[in-house]
Amino acid sequence: MTDSPKKLHIVITGATSGIGKQLAKDYLADGHYVYAVGRDNNALSELKDLGATPIDLDLMDRDKVVAAFADISQIDLAICGAGMCEYLDMPNFDSETFMKVMSVNMGTLSHAIEGVLPKLMVSKGRLVGIGSASAYVPFARAEAYGSSKAAIHYLMKTLQISLAPHDVSVSLVVPGFVETPMTKQNDFPMPFLQTTEQASCAIRKGIADDHDVIEFPKKLTLPLKALGTLPDLVWQQVGQKLNKK
C-alpha cells in the first residue's frame, strides 16, 4: 500500500484573478489547503466555497501582510503572483506610472516574502515568484513592466543562493503570454498565447519536479532567451523595427 500524497498548506497571492485564481482552484481540487490572498471579494467568496481560506489583504501594506501571514500556522508552499502592468508611450516618460508599476510588482512580492519566509524556514518549503519572458529582451512600451520583472528575476535567483543553506527552495516562474484580465489590454499580437489552465499545469508540474526555473511555453521563451544573447546593437535594431510595426 502506497502512502497518499502529502497535503500542502499553500499561500497564493494574486489568487483572485488570472493565473493565481486558476492555481488556487487546481490545488484545492487536489485536496491541498489553500490560503487565497486577494482584494476581489466575489472571487474570494468563490474560492471559499471551493474550500480555500480567503484573506482580503492589501499587499502594499507591509505591517498588515506580516501580521496576516504570522497568523497562518503552517506554510509549505508560497506562490507570489500579485502584480500589475501598465505601458509607457514615448516620447513622454511618465515617471508616476513607471514607479507605480515598479512599486506594486516589487512591493507586493517583497512584503509577501517577508511574511511567509519564517514559516517556510520551519517547513523547509518552497517560495515561488512570478516573473515574465519580457525580462529576457527589451520591448518598447514595456519599460516599467519589463524592468519590474527583470528585478524579480534577479531577486528570485539571488534567493535561490541565499536561502539554500536554510533548506528553503526557490522557484522563478517565467511565463509567456497568458490569457488573463491583465493581458486583455494588450493591443498587439501575443504569440503562443496560453490559457490559465495551461499555465497552472506548467507551474504545478514545475513545482512538483523541484525546478528552479519554470518556463513556458518553450517555443516562445527559448527564442526570446536566444535573442537576449545578441549584441546590444543588433537587438536595438530589431527592437526599433518591431516598434515601428
Image: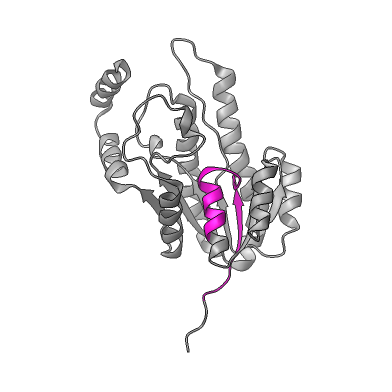
What is the x, y in percent for residue 138?
Answer: 36, 28
Where 12 sits versus 125, above or below? above
| Residue 168 in view of the camera | no
Location of residue 22 in the rendering, given as x and y in whole percent from the top left corner = 52, 51
Q: Residue at x 62, y 40 (%)?
A: 108
In which image quadrant can residue 9 be found? bottom right
Residue 24 counted in the magenta span: yes
The number of numbered discs placed on residues in the rendered structure image is 0
Decide whether residue 231 is among the magenta residues: no
Q: What's the residue at 67%, 48% (across, down)?
A: 44
Find residue 37 and report its horizontal and vertical position in percent. 65, 48
In the image, taking residue 226 as reference, residue 136 lies left or right, namely: right
Residue 244 occupies quadrant: top left
- The magenta span reads 5-26
**Residue 12 shows up from this direction:** yes
Residue 83 horizontal side relative to residue 60, left or right: left
Residue nearest the viewer, comparing 185 with 104: 185
